[in-house]
Image (cartoon, rainbow, N blue to C red):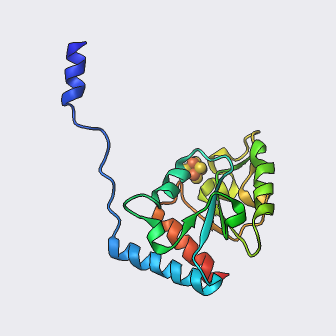
């Protein structure tokens, strides 16, 4: 026991250092999204995240947008607690049978104008869960989708680029 304890005390951590985002590129991208949102909406963007059956990998990347590295709030975006306050629904995962109604009701509760972004490969067509008896399919199988951000999972920069594309195209 003592030997095992000493082994783990002296062993170096297994975790890797987090990749540092390019601060100037991030600031430029964040400012562009904020400008596009203000042009479209006259204010900053409010985002509601909906996990429709994800493995949680996409959630980790979305949560990273708010961590000390990316700090999404400084660009004026807000992750809101209710779809009633949202402009964008960021939907992850394949839609599971059990989450289908919740997703439909969330969409119905979001005021117009609203946009739906399907996040990750699962959001497109079910990804690695496609064909499962527990899944309906991708997000578009349940509600209209305006943009898909590919990846398994997409990283925070790809998420920001997706939001910018959404605001510029719509
Ligand atoms: S796209 Fe990848 S990370 Fe995202 S929910 Fe599917 S399996 Fe998980």
Is residue 93 shown above or below 109?
above
Q: Residue at x 58, y 83 (%)?
A: 38
Q: Is residue 40 left or right of residue 143?
A: left
Is residue 13 shown above or below 3?
below
For the N terminus, the quadrant is: top left
Is residue 2 shown above or below 104?
above
For the C terminus, the quadrant is: bottom right
Q: Is residue 25 left or right of residue 53?
A: left
Q: Residue at x 62, y 76 (%)?
A: 166
Q: Residue furthest bottom?
A: 39
Q: Residue at x 77, y 42 (%)?
A: 98
Q: Is residue 95 left or right of residue 49?
A: right
Q: How many marks?
A: 0
Q: Which residue is drawn at 53% across and 48% down?
A: 57
Residue 117 point in image, percent of width and height? 65, 66
Question: Residue 26 versus residue 76: which sits nearer the camera?
Answer: 76
Residue 101 point in image, percent of width and height? 81, 50
Residue 160 point in image, percent of width and height? 51, 70
Residue 145 point in image, percent of width and height? 72, 67
Question: Residue 75 versus residue 166: which sits nearer the camera?
Answer: 75
Q: In this view, does 63 lie to the left or right of 117?
A: left
């Amino acid at each position: 026991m003592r030997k095992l304890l000493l082994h783990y005390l002296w062993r170096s951590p297994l975790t890797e250092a987090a990749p540092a985002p390019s601060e100037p590129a991030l600031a430029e991208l964040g400012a562009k999204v904020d400008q596009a949102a203000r042009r479209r909406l006259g204010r900053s963007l409010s985002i509601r995240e909906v996990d429709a059956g994800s493995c949680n990998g996409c959630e980790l990347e979305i949560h990273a947008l708010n961590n000390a590295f990316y700090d999404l709030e400084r660009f004026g975006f807000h992750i809101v607690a209710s779809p009633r306050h949202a402009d964008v629904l960021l939907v992850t995962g394949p839609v599971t049978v059990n989450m289908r109604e919740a997703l439909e009701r969330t969409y119905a509760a979001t005021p117009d104008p609203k946009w739906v972004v399907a996040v990750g490969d699962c959001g497109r067509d079910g990804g690695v869960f496609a064909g499962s008896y527990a899944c309906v399919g991708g997000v578009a199988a349940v509600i209209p989708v305006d943009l898909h951000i590919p990846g398994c999972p997409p990283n925070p920069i790809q998420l920001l680029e997706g939001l910018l594309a959404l605001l510029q195209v719509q």
